[in-house]
Amino acid sequence: MSKKNKKNQNEEAKAAQQEEVLNEENANQSTQEKTSEEKLDPEQRIAELEQQLEHEKEKYLYLMADLENFRKRTLKEKDDLIRNGAERAMRDLLPVVDDLERAIDAINKGGDLDSLREGVDLIYNKFVKYLASQHVTAIDSTGKDFDTDLHDAVTMFPATDPAMKGKVIDTTIKGYMINDKVLRHAKVVVGS
């Protein structure tokens, strides 16, 4: 090794030793300060810690009360939603009920059959429009492939056309979906 390298190594070793000594002195000094602080005024230190503990207790109690209030409020809101969730839907159905009552009165009075038929068609269209506003749509089944996620097979019927095997031949009760979820499965006759 060259003299320069040895000199650099010696200087680095001395610097490391000095750093260790400084670190030890700092550590000793900080522990001495802590112990001297504790030795100098233990009653003040106890009072300070009791005050800090009291502050933490108050903070904890406040947070617990806040959490309890939040829990009660959310339970009440959930209960209100469950109780009154259908209120808007039912209120929007009342005009359809009114129209049906008027149609029944017209039938009982023996009105014109064509106007009665037209009135019932208007009520039906109004009701279908209401269902669409609530995101309820009819499942189109006849002529489609039988799908157990959408259809309930009422019966199997021999298909006259081989292309109709496994397909819905007839829909006995229409199915409905709400927001891409099946509300009621369609009751269908399937070709075999």
Image (cartoon, rainbow, N blue to C red):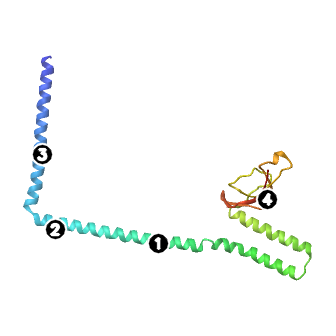
Q: Secondary structure at mark 1?
A: helix
Which circle's residue, 2 or 3, is located before the other in the chain? 3
Marks 1 and 2 sit apart, C-alpha to C-alpha, by 39 Å
Tag 4–tag 2 contact (CB < 8 Å):
no
Q: Which residue is found at the position 10% from the left and 39% from the top?
A: 21
Give the label, 3 or 1, closer to the camera.
1
| Residue extending farthest top | 2
The answer to which of marks 4 and 3 sits earlier in the sequence is 3
User: Secondary structure under badge 2?
Assistant: helix
Frontmost residue, 192 versus 36: 192
> Is the residue 151 above or below the residue 44 in the image?
above
Q: Which residue is mark 4?
A: 171
Q: Nearer the viewer, residue 182 or 34?
A: 182
Residue 77 shown left or right of residue 140 in the figure: left
Q: Quadrant of residue 41?
A: bottom left
**Callout 1 environment at 10 Å: few (<14), some (14 to 19), or many (20+)?**
few
Q: CA distance from mark 2 to mark 3?
A: 28 Å
Q: Amino acid at mark 2?
A: Ala
Image coords of residue 12 (percent x, y): 14, 29
Q: Is residue 7 above or below residue 16?
A: above
Extreme-bottom residue of the structure: 109
Q: Which residue is mark 1?
A: 73
For the residues bearing labels 3 and 1, Cβ distance under 8 angstroms:
no
Element marked by disc 4: strand
Q: Position of residue 123 (x, y in %)?
A: 80, 71
Q: Which residue type does callout 1 highlight?
A: Arg
Closest to the camera, between mark 4 and mark 1, is 4
* Residue at the spot of label 2: 47
- State which tag comes first along the sequence, 1 or 2: 2
Identify the element where label 3 is drawn: helix
- Give the mark toward the camera: 4 or 3: 4
